[in-house]
Image: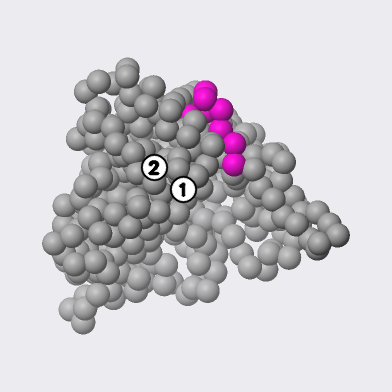
């Protein structure tokens, strides 16, 4: 029997709830498809700060490095906002991405037919949406140096540096082109080349890499236009390739096409080593512990893990099918409810319904 080791990071807020539900479903699907999942649960984010004083303890990082995949729920809590930046949960996530060299973030956005009415856009605009955002994840303004805050005669000054090398751009571009080969063979590269030097280099390098992929149609858009086009005509996009900052913003906009950010999974990958799979949504501390969270994005992230990290495609497809069947029957968590006909359920009840479809 094939066995896989998964480092499980439940993190903060709704993290423990959606982790519990997802773990249960994964154990069911692994039993059905005859492979073994060994979960190692480690502290991360606020829970780690409470016990270890840092958001990413060395023991947690080592377990992540030594596993076959990392499955993360969510991190972040306002009660840690007053800590120095290097001590906050979000800094732990940046360090984890950097330490594992998770430079390629894949965020698929596909409309589940039962949820068309949950979107804020008209049905005609979204019913054929099927795109993926390929976001560079370990460089750009989130990691650039110098950065900081200084005192000046004119007052306090803060600064960050957006920086990319040609190698950093090339490797994420190659990932995007390879993804496009498996889809509709269209890439829209998003930048701000009319203003930023770093974006001019981005556009030059992406264009250069495209010469190796003649079968792929490449276009370019400025980020402000791309944001507008995502709500004006989202079906025009197949693969969106972009930098760390722009990808962060655009993928959240794209998430709302599905009706809720609670529906969007992601995978963060490296050339060699374990990948990180996590829902795009945050920790939602306002609803934590209330059985109100939507666990579907984490389950879909787990399906990406099964498919990409373990090559257990049949199991992944079965999990996705189970989720769609439950949604088709009208069951919704609060964030997805769009009519009085919906059957409102909590996080754990949604997990029970999906588990029944797997059994």
Q: Position of residue 56 (x, y in %)?
A: 67, 46
Q: Are marks 1 and 2 in contact (CB under 8 Å)?
A: yes
* Residue 314 quadrant: top left
Most extreme residue toward the bottom is: 340
Query: Circle 2: is it few (<14), some (14-19), or many (20+) Cα within 10 Å?
Result: many
87 relative to 181 in the view: left or right: right
Residue 288 appears anywhere in the view: yes
Q: Indicate yes or no whether the magenta region holds residue 82.
A: no
Tell me what residue is drawn at x 44 percent, y 26 percent.
205
Q: Position of residue 296 (x, y in %)?
A: 34, 57
> Which numbered dot is residue 190?
2
Q: Is residue 54 above or below residue 169?
A: below
> Which numbered dot is residue 246?
1
Region rendered in magenta: 162-169
Q: Quadrant of the N terminus?
A: top left
Q: Is residue 18 above or below residue 135?
A: below
Between 337 and 125, the residue placed more toward the observer is 125
Q: Is residue 9 above or below residue 220?
A: below
Q: According to the image, what is the colour scheme of the structure?
A: one colour
Most extreme residue toward the top is: 212
């Amino acid at each position: 029997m094939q066995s896989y080791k998964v480092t499980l990071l439940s993190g903060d807020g709704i993290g423990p709830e959606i982790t519990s539900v997802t773990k249960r479903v994964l154990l069911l699907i692994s039993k059905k498809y005859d492979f073994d999942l060994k979960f190692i649960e480690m502290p991360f984010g606020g829970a780690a700060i409470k016990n270890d004083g840092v958001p990413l303890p060395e023991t947690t990082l080592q377990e992540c490095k030594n596993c076959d995949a990392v499955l993360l729920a969510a991190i972040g809590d306002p009660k840690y906002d007053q800590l120095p930046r290097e001590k906050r949960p979000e800094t732990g996530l940046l360090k984890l991405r950097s330490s594992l060299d998770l430079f390629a973030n894949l965020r698929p956005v596909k409309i589940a037919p039962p949820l068309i009415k949950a979107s804020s856009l008209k049905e005609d605009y979204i019913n054929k949406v099927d795109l993926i955002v390929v976001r560079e994840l370990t460089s750009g303004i989130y990691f650039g140096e110098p950065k900081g805050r200084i005192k000046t005669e004119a007052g306090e000054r803060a600064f960050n540096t957006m920086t990319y090398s040609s190698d950093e751009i090339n490797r994420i571009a190659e990932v995007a082109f390879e993804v496009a080969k498996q889809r509709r063979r269209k890439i829209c590269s998003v930048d701000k080349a009319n203003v930023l030097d770093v974006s001019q280099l981005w556009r030059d390098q992406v264009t250069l890499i495209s010469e190796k992929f003649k079968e792929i149609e490449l276009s370019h858009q400025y980020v402000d236009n791309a944001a507008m086009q995502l709500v004006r005509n989202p079906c025009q996009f197949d693969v969106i390739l972009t930098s760390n900052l722009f990808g962060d913003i655009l993928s959240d906009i794209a998430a709302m096409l599905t009706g809720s950010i609670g529906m969007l999974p992601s995978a963060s990958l490296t050339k060699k080593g374990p990948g990180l799979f996590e829902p795009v949504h945050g920790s939602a501390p306002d609803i934590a512990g209330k059985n109100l969270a939507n666990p579907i994005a984490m389950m879909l992230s787990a399906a990406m893990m099964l498919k990409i990290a373990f090559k257990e495609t049949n199991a992944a497809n079965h999990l996705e099918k189970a989720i769609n069947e439950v949604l088709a029957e009208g069951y919704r968590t609060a964030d997805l409810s769009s009519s009085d006909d919906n059957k409102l359920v909590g996080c754990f009840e949604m997990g029970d319904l999906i588990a029944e479809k797997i059994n």
